[in-house]
Amino acid sequence: MDPALQPSSSVDMATINRQETDNSESPFDKTDFSAAQYVNDLFPDEDSLANLGPFIDSIHSQIRRVDGEILEAVRRQSSSGSKARHELRTAQSSITEMLQQVGEIKRKAAQSETMVQEICRDIKKLDFAKKHLTSTITALRRLGMLITAVDQLQLAAERREFGEAAHLLGAVQQLAAHFKDYSHVPRVAEMRGRVAALEQSLRGTSLREFELLGEDFPSPSLLDRLRDCCAVTAAVGSAARDELVDSVCRREMGVYTQIFGTIGETAKLERTMNRYKWLLRRLEARKDVWGIFPADWRVPQLLCVTFCSITKTQLAEILDEKAGELPHQVSNLLKAVEATHIFEAEMSRRYETPGGSGTNISNNNVIHGEDDGDGFDAGEGFDAAEVRWRYEKERAQRTSAASSSPTKQTLRQHAAAEAVARALFRGSISQVFVPYLKVYVDHVERSLTWSVEQITSAETWQALAADQPILKSANELTEAVRGEMKDCVSRISRGQTLLDLSLVFGKVYTAYASRLVSKLPNRSGAAAAGTGKSTAAMLGVTDWHVKLEDGDIEVIALIINTAEHCIEMLRQLEKALVARLEAPLGEKVDFSEQEDEFRSVVTQCLSTLILGVETKLEIHLASLMRHNWAAVEIAGDQSDFVGAMRAVLADVGTNAGPALPSNHFRFFCDKLLRSLAPRVREAIFRCRAISDAGCQQLRLDLEALKGGLVSMAKAGHVDEDSVAWTATFAADVNAQLASVEAVLKVVSSPPEALLDAFMELLPDASPSEFQRIADLKGLKRSELAAVLDDYTRRVGHVLPRTALMQPHSNTTAGGNNNYLGATDSSEGGGMFTSPLKGGTAMPSSFRAPKARVASKASTSAQEMAARLSSVKQNANLQAAKATDSMRETTGRMLGAMKSLRFMQRDQQ
């Protein structure tokens, strides 16, 4: 036996049988059944083989049981097949028998129908005879009645008894409707001809009777006769009614056209109101005349519609002839437009009825039994096709009968009258003014432009109130624009004219923004005109200076608040216009350009304020450069220039902090810090040699300057956010001025540790900055040479040896107090360049092209080095030429920066 199949322990046969019985699926039924695995599971060891015999007997017993089940299943299947064939034959015989019975039923039904037809044949003949006889008798009676009624109608027409004729005509028409299908009968054709002739005669007679209406008040008898004529005309038909109404309207409008025309005094625009007054007086004076007409004829309304059509045509001719004079007659044009709108509103109030006749007709249909739900019951022995056919037949009969009934005709007439009632009066005349209202728009534009000039000229440039820090002119402009909008909506139009007026509002606000900008302090290119022959004055690098006078900061803050207020007013104005304009035109209103204009005003205000503060601080930075820091022996209190700078910052914080909105004041502080930090660093580089005590003093001054900046930031609005922002700003102040403090630490380090301190504190500094720091250290030639050689060995960058010949090259003999305008572009900012990035976009003139400055500076340095290396004369002559060459090169560098400043000024 295979060792893998040998059992390793005893097996309980009861356990085996129980496992096979409990399992929902026998292990022998599995597709992945493995005999070896199954035996090993049952007999895992030698002891388990003791039950091998009983297990085999159990397996044989299971085999016999399965064979018996298979045999039983085969027997059942054999017997069920025989039974199924027997049942199929039985069903087929039943079907055959059923078909025979159905055929017998049909045959008997045909026999029954034939028998019934034979029995009822005589009865049908009698029924048809009775029906035809009844129809003939009825037709003869109606024919007699028709003849009598026609004779009476003719007699009433000859006597002009219109009331009697109206009743007889209605009866004649109803009787004649019964003979519609007998028109081929000569007698019937003759009577129908007589009826038509009488209708035509009554139609003409009624028209002639209405010609008796004159300008004088008609007598009551005439009114009664005319009322009867209206009844006759209504009985004749809608065509006669329309002809009569048109005749009356033409006669009334004939009087109107005789009084009002397109020439003469009545054709003046200022007398347009007289036209409408005439019609209203006419309607009131002839109220009794309009009362003779049936109400559903809507004669007064049709008369007004005719009046509107004629008036529109005449006004179009008048406006076309006077088109050249309209710019000088704007007030008269507006009076005519206003009068027209008032008249149209009055006509709409009188005659425009809400809803229409649709609801009434629908209700009448239901009342007369024309409900779609009335039909046959499909469950009464009829199949679906037959029920549908009968239902459609019944519907057709009812529709045909209802369409020819007087009630249906009356409903159609009322529907037509209601359609006339829904004729819109609004815009029926006023549309003629639309092409000519451009003169009104131009007039409003001139008026608002003049208003802007007046209110800005009279502006006191002070806050409107303590709780409203805006200019008075902004409120006056808003009121003027709101008044023009309301005037246009109430008097002129809500359509294209109002949309054109919105464009005018945009232009006016743009002009107001320009006037606000013109009030800002201007940049002065002649700020250095009083410095004699100083380098800055010759180079013109102070053209960015902005001199802030007393009160300028408050004015700038007012302009910023006013611009923000105008932005909000523009948004409200846009919403108001969209709500008042007609639906398709509201989407075209857009004041985004004007909002951008006022945002630009805010930007220019902040730029001007920053440059003004920088102009004040530059004077004190020049004092920093002029001071002899090499002579400082001991550090003491803060320097005078720092005290002056703190005073400037404190003044700015006091005046601008409470006046500016929080977001703008924070923006101002951030941008001022980012602009001032590189200036302070450059000012230190422009100093001559600085002693260790001088470095300590400058570090103390730097801490005092930080405190001044933080104090300025605290002067703004005090709220929950301001405390957190002030802390953030203080951290930003330390970060921005950290490089300045690092420069001072490097300069104060011993000569032997200068390079190590530079590499540690200023790891991102350029080689040129190291040379400038070495110059500030004031080293001797031998010490400077050793430091530069050490830097070359460690960094691998060869520095020019010009510093060995002129150690203190950070300044010139002529003084350096105006070098703040000439910056090294490698310092990440410029002395005259405000790095106003992020937040509100600043003018492009603040962003100097640094790459161009660096290129020119590098070229000048190379020229200087070449000139110095080519000098091979004696020491005194060489030093003299080197000095001349350096001055010439320095002049070229400053000249290049001057050209750059002019280019920036041209771009503004």
Image: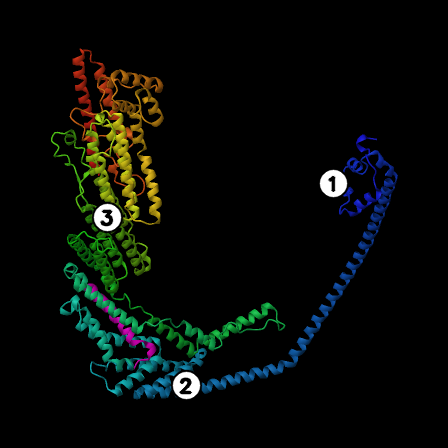
Q: Position of residue 771 (x, y in %)?
A: 28, 22
Viewer-side residue, 331 vs 819: 819
Residue position for label 2: 146
Q: Position of residue 725 (x, y in %)?
A: 34, 44
Badge 2 element: helix
Please say if 111 is above or below 772: below
For marks 3 and 1, give the CA distance: 91 Å
User: Which residues fall within the magenta stretch?
Assistant: 292-317
Residue position for label 1: 31
Residue 219 magenta-drawn? no
Viewer-side residue, 606 vs 100: 606
For marks 1 and 2, give the CA distance: 103 Å
State which tag comes first along the sequence, 3 or 1. Answer: 1
- Residue 557, which numbered label? 3
Q: Amino acid at mark 3?
A: Ala
- Residue 234, which numbered label? none
Q: Amino acid at mark 2?
A: Leu
Badge 3 element: helix
Badge 1 element: loop
